[in-house]
Image (cartoon, rainbow, N blue to C red):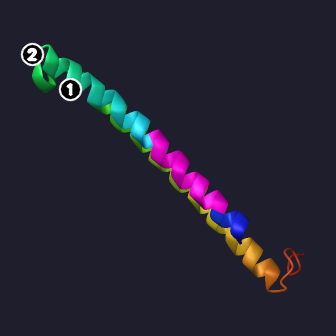
Amino acid sequence: MRRMLEKRKALYRKFAVGSLCLLTIPALILLLSIYKGAGGAGLVPGIPIYLALLGGAIYQFRKELRELKWEEEGRVSNEAGCEPGKNEK
């Protein structure tokens, strides 16, 4: 149980760091663009790329979280005395 909690914390930490890194790229571009007097116009061409990267990161996070939940459920059923594959032919 403790190992699963550690895995879950590591997954959340990995997602948080990854999303912050992905969000700093447009923030830096916006800051440079405002500093040079162009406003938010520098962000417009890159918005689809940033959204695609962020969507990919969210998809990967959800996929890994789902796998972790399945692993937890497998361990719970094994601890309850159920053997995997016992009902399979």
Where does label 1 land, which residue?
44
Q: 71 above or below 86?
A: above
What residue is rendered at 84% in x and 75% in y?
84
Residue type at mark 2 is Gly
Q: Position of residue 64 (x, y in %)?
A: 60, 54
Q: Position of residue 46 (x, y in %)?
A: 29, 25
On the rendered structure, is 75 left or right of 57? right
- Magenta region includes residue 12: yes
Q: Quadrant of the N terminus?
A: bottom right
Element type at mark 2: loop
For residue 35, what is the image quadrant? Answer: top left
Q: Position of residue 39 (x, y in %)?
A: 11, 23
Residue 81 visible here: yes
Image: magenta residue range = 6-18
Q: 4 above or below 22?
A: below
Where does label 2 land, which residue?
37
Tag in front: 2 or 1: 2
What residue is rendered at 14% in x and 13% in y?
36
